[in-house]
Image (spheres, coloured by chain):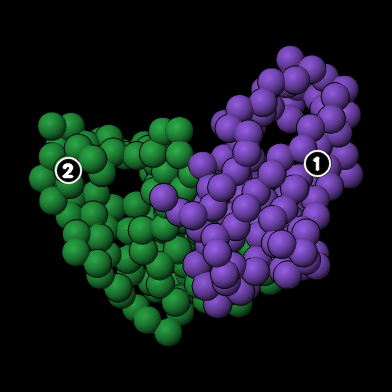
Amino acid sequence: GENVEQHPSTLSVQEGDSAVIKCTYSDSASNYFPWYKQELGKGPQLIIDIRSNVGEKKDQRIAVTLNKTAKHFSLHITETQPEDSAVYFCAGDTGRRALTFGSGTRLQVQP
Amino acid sequence: DSGVTQTPKHLITATGQRVTLRCSPRSGDLSVYWYQQSLDQGLQFLIQYYNGEERAKGNILERFSAQQFPDLHSELNLSSLELGDSALYFCASSVGGVRDSPLHFGNGTRLTVT
């Protein structure tokens, strides 16, 4: 079945620096890869997604890259701000028609 | 606000009891997904319904069951509760399947089994 590995589990950066979170997946049939941000006491919120026919996608300070050959994808956050502090999850679609999530990265942006 | 409503927000109950969690999807969404989030397991997929029919099953225990009603709201029933069932339970909805449209999550129900 589908397995999604995510690292690092925690990441601390200074305000204004960039943050990169990486994920790998095992199911070569996967073609949809969303990223979610979860703040304390809330549900995961979709922040960006990418499909396998695209190598990179940007939305303001957030970008996602996908290497389908190597089966890995990454989230890049530039010019980090304190409000970016949260837990970030990567995910991939599976043959069971559901998303499989990575284990999460706790990002802390130090002011 | 994702538009997905989950009730109740918190639930405290004893081992052996049964509870029902409720989810109202976003307007227009036909798919409902249930996920369990615990500290050591991350977000685990339980079950998906599409327009009233079960579409996919994940790691859902036999003690757990779900259904989606004609008005598209969904309920997750947890019975013979054990301490290990304590977790956050999330509902998500989408227009179609996971490959067709993004999932939007509610804010969850926190279940504590004592």
Coordinates of residue B23 in the picture (x, y in percent) = 65, 49
Determine the CA span between mark 2 and mark 1. Answer: 40 Å
Q: Residue at x 63, y 38 (%)?
A: B7
Q: Is residue A54 left or right of residue A4?
A: left
Q: Which one of the lettered chains is coloured green?
A: A
Label drawn at residue A71: none
Subunit of label 2: A
Coordinates of residue A105 in the picture (x, y in percent) = 40, 42
Q: Is residue B78 left or right of residue A37?
A: right
Nearer the viewer's eye, disc 2 or disc 1? Answer: 1
Coordinates of residue B76 in the picture (x, y in percent) = 76, 45
Tag 2, which secondary structure? loop
Question: Does residue A32 sit above or below B114 in this rendering?
Answer: below
Outermost residue toward the top? Answer: B114
**Which residue is tagged 1?**
B77
Confirm whether residue B32 shows in the render: yes
Which residue type does callout 2 highlight?
Answer: Gln
Label drawn at residue A81: 2
Q: Which one of the lettered chains is coloured purple?
A: B
Subunit of label 1: B
Question: Does residue A28 sit above or below A14 in this rendering?
Answer: below
Q: Residue at x 17, y 55 (%)?
A: A78
Confirm whether residue A13 shows in the render: no
Q: Quadrant of residue A56?
A: bottom left
For label 2, count other residues whose C-alpha is less than 10 Å away and answer few (under 14), some (14-19) or many (20+): some
Nearer-the-camera pick, A30 or B31: B31
Q: Quadrant of residue B10?
A: top right
Coordinates of residue A27 in the picture (x, y in percent) = 61, 69
Q: Are marks 2 and 1 in contact (CB under 8 Å)?
A: no
